[in-house]
Amino acid sequence: MGELRQTWRGLSRSPGFTLTAVLILAIGIGANTAIFSLADAVILRPLPGISDPSSLVDLSGDSVSYPIFRSIRDEAAGTARMAAWSDRSMSLAHAGDARMVGGAVVSANYFDVLGARPALGRFFQPSEDEGGEAVAVLAEGFWAGEFGADPAILGRSIHVNGVPLTIVGVAPKGFRGAAFAIFPDLWVPVGTWPRLATGPLANFDIHSRNWGWMSVFGRLEPGVPLEKARAALLTILRRDAAAHGEDFDAARWSVVPTTVAATGANEEFGPPRIFALLAGAVLTALLIACANLANLLLARGAARQKEIAVRQALGASRGRIARQVLSESLLLGLAGGAAGLVVASALLSLFVQVPLIEDFTLGLFRPELGSRAFIFAAILATLVGVLFGLLPAWRASSAPAAPILAAGSSRIARAAGLNKALVSAQVALCLALLATSGLLGRSLVRALSIDLGLEPRGVTVARVNTGLARYDAARALTFAAELPRRLAEDPSVRAATWTSSLPLSGSRDEESVEIEGYTPSRGERPVVDVAAVGPAYFRALGVPVLAGREFEASDRMGTAGVAVVNRAMAERYWPATSPLGRRITVANEPWTVIGVVGNAKSASLTDAPVPQVWAPLLQFPPAALMRLTLVVKSDAAPEVVAGAIRREVRSLDAALPVTQIGPYSDVVAARLLPQRVGATLLGLFGILSLVLAAVGIYAVVSWTTRRRAAEFGIRLALGARAADVRRLVLRSMAGSVALGAACGLALSAAVGIALRSALYGLAPADPLALAGATLLLAAAALLAADLPARRAARIDPAQALRQE
């Protein structure tokens, strides 16, 4: 304690050094703690409110029907307790307004299998799988936000999809089920779902084996290994298929731990990879900070050489000297950790508000600076304090007293060599971070410049679900015709129309097709993307009409079926002739091709064009009108158009929920989420590391120039020019920067290879990204070294020699 008090007094006598060190550490530790808190909520603990998640498994493959699930559930007894669920959007009428909420249809044993305990009331009973009263369980956050956490909610009714549901319970805090990125606001049992089903779903019988709509998971019984459960479940599926004369393909099915599936690890660039990238970035910034502070402590130690030599002469041991220096770094580390919690809180508040896809944010995972984050910050602060304090402690304790008192120049040279080595390490790490952010940024620019075949600018979209409002066919037709007509009355609106499938939104509808004039080869089954669209659809999205015409208001039910195809389909199936006038048959409906349009991206930005067919919305069955996307091309600002859409929908039907209103460009940008997140956050951490590296270079050059003041004074006294001294100082640091840059380029190329799947048309070692990062770092290093070099060149020889 005496040494700690002495160390604290020493640090308090150097407030500039102390504040600088604490600030640098606060940024590094705070950024790492914020990323840890996010990863803890999304990856490390992906199943809040669930007991013993390690024994849960997902049956991955196709969705299954309710009868097949019951067969699995009954026959798996003794191996695992199985449950099923299906997420469904629902319309909630509350407080005089209607809005979409996330719902889930679950088997009655769903909560029991997950080991959840209600925060209020009860969960579902087995009899509610087969009917009975229509009931629901609310999510705790939804209960608190929508109903003010009213404990009297039990027994009350809410109207969902126009049906009153009795609230019987509230789920535990944070509970969201066992799937990745699914956040239900309420759950209903299987027996309640037939009353809620609307539109095409109302025609499906939940007791039909042919309607696969449920995902299955289970909890392994004690002592049952994963491999045994996998074999048992596949056997059950095989036996069930054989009993009903159905084919079974075991390759389509797998049994995986739910804790793995719930992190999105199966996604091509899912959260585990994104967080690994971010963790690497913040850890790199922290290592740069450590190297920087080690340099500062070495410089501080060099200034205290005579003090330490006197201590040694008075009998202090090497261990005592090392412990004193190390206690200084530990105090700085702990102070930086405490300040880092404030930085982490601010960063976490910022991260959770950033919209990722539409209304989806990381705040839905409820990350917080809890006890685990505090422990992480404390451990990290201790490790960092030891890490950047070891080298200065070793240097201070190993220094012999006599040469130091004699101010030996070789001693100074060796210390400067260590400083330069740390500078090289900082430069290498900083360059790797800058180059990686530049690589992702270039990839983002390249992706945004891809020819989409359509024009997102000036387009606002909104999703409307008339099915959830229980519209019949006549009412849906009236609404589908009236809303675009009203919006088109605005002079700024160029086109207003509908589509059943918006390009690049993640939804596609593939159908088999029979094509006049084309004979499939053996085993070939022509498949096309099909969408129902309204008049002026291609004009609204800027898709060029290459031949024929697009749809008109006269193309409706009762007239001859017509279709428009894209160029990819025309070239694939009619390469030597015009497709106009040719007949195609989709879902037993004959259509005549009346137009050919250009190729437009449909699923992703990198997909090659695929055959696509569009048909008039008003020639589709009424079920197609139940869930549509409105497309409005306008010269007005997106927020103005969005306001007009809400206003007109409310005037037509205030109880009709409208969701996901926003610029179409945001929908397209969502396809580039990994690149946007990576480029933005890595860019921020890259700039931070650049500042830290520049500070480190400045500190080293400043220290070496002060130690060589007498040498520079002699050179100037003997006739050297100021430019010669300045050049000498810069040249002394150039080697360290060049070595660090070479190592950084190699490290950047390795990171680029690891990120190959996230790059659009770029090599992992993209020359422009590497050159840009190198030039930026070189400019920062030159500026940081030039400031003390200029100061050294202005030394007064007489004053420098007099001080020596």
Image (cartoon, rainbow, N blue to C red):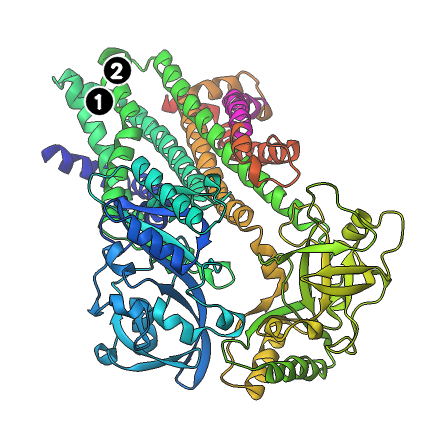
Judging by the rendered image, the residue that carries numbered circle 1 is 308
Can residue 792 be seen in this snapshot? yes
Question: What residue is pinned by disc 2?
Answer: 399
Q: Earlier in the sequence, mark 2 or mark 1?
A: 1
Image quarter for residue 537?
bottom right
To which quarter of the image does residue 602 belong?
bottom right
The percent position of residue 552, horizontal first and vertical second, equals 79, 74
Nearer to the camera, 591 or 798:
591
Q: Is residue 269 left or right of residue 401?
A: right
Do labels 2 and 1 touch, CB within 8 Å? yes
Apparent side of residue 45 relative to residue 475 in the rendered image (left or right): left
Q: Is residue 640 magenta?
A: no
- Percent position (x, y) of residue 578? 88, 55
Question: What is the secondary structure assignment of the residue under circle 1?
Answer: helix
Is 69 drawn above or below residue 340 in the view shown? Answer: below
Q: CA distance from mark 2 to mark 1?
A: 9 Å
Q: Which span is picked out in magenta?
A: 724-749
Give the amino acid at mark 1: Ile
